[in-house]
Amino acid sequence: MGEVQTIGVVGSGQMGGGIAQIAATSGIGAIAFDVHQTSLDKCRKLHEKLMGRAVEKERMTRDEADAALGRITYTANFDDLAGADWIIEAAVEDMKLKGELFAQLAGMFDKREDVVLATNTSSISITEIATAADKGAAGAGSRVVGMHFFNPVPVMKLVEVIRGLQTSDDVVNRTVALAERMGKVPLRANDRAGFVSNRVLMPMINEAFYAWMEGVAEPEAIDGIMKLGCAHPMGPLRLADFIGLDTCVHIMDVLAEGLNNERYRACPKLKQLVMAGRLGDKSGHGVFEYGK
Ligand SMILES: NC(=O)c1ccc[n+]([C@@H]2O[C@H](COP(=O)([O-])OP(=O)(O)OC[C@H]3O[C@@H](n4cnc5c(N)ncnc54)[C@H](O)[C@@H]3O)[C@@H](O)[C@H]2O)c1
């Protein structure tokens, strides 16, 4: 089993684009696949812009940037993923969609048992995704692993490596090695709802909404207290806007269901803002307002 040559990245949005970029800058080929040509075009433009900026700031030479850009291919043809020897899926957070994708990927790589099928899901059970892969090809679930990158991918150092019930030791070890090769710090977790990151972070954010709802303090004060008193780089309410308030509700629902505990239910204040279309940065208004 040789060194990974080409990573097939499924989904070229915010996360998939970043994953393809760091693969390329680490000397690994990337096949960026997306069902939407607009996402691929946007992704390619962003790569060119970010590499251009890195050259201006003398973090890489023009030759290095061109070589990295040359390692990425962009495609809307699913079959092109067969040219990869490792998959990282970063399509939208939807179990039905991921289930179908993993069954298809398992079928594609049925005869190539060294190809790992990783997912960047932030909340869906790795075990459930592995079970979907098993439906595509018996035994493929042992090659499914969580490879949870953080946003923005080129900046954030962590990769949470999550093992599902079926994931083999060898796959976990190879995932740790690949994350290191991509310049990241891999830390291992088991497959429970929210893994470690969202299980610890999201209830804190939810609690900040309760504090606001109950009139304990206004949002500026809640965030200021957490920044200045607890050394958080960003207050919990500002962070919620950055993540997306709808995403926060979704993750709280996953925690409540997966951990079977009502204490993880989303705060009514958070749900109310989502109902009003205040989703955070992406809608220009969440807890705070953002200029257009
Ligand atoms: N945004 C974050 O902060 C963050 C952090 C960690 C993990 N994640 C996870 O990463 C994944 C992607 O999130 P994102 O923020 O990049 O979303 P995004 O909406 O920016 O990108 C998703 C992309 O998937 C594409 N897509 C939809 N269906 C597809 C299919 N069948 N095949 C291939 N591509 C398809 C869309 O066209 C879109 O370009 C999700 O599972 C999310 O939970 C997100």
Image (cartoon, grey):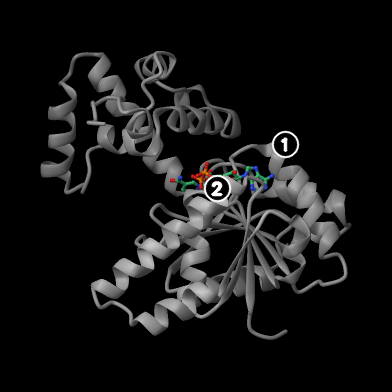
> Distance between the Cα atoms at labels 1 and 2?
21 Å
Q: Which residue is mark 2?
A: 39
Label 2: which secondary element? helix
Q: Which residue is mark 1?
A: 96
Q: Residue at x 50, y 55 (%)?
A: 43
How many residues crowd around disc 1 within 10 Å: few (fewer than 14), some, or many (20 or more)?
Answer: few
Label 1 CB-ligand 1 distance < 8 A: no
Question: Residue 259, located in which quarter of the rendered image?
Answer: top right
Label 2 CB-ligand 1 distance < 8 A: yes
Residue 91 is situated, as x and y percent measured from the top left of the image, at: 61, 47
Q: Residue at x 42, y 64 (%)?
A: 48
Question: Residue 222, located in which quarter of the rendered image?
Answer: top left
- Up/down of 167 relative to 1, above or below: above
Q: Residue at x 61, y 48 (%)?
A: 37
The amino acid sitting under disc 1 is Lys
- Up/down of 83 relative to 132, above or below: below
Residue 201 is situated, as x and y percent measured from the top left of the image, at: 37, 41
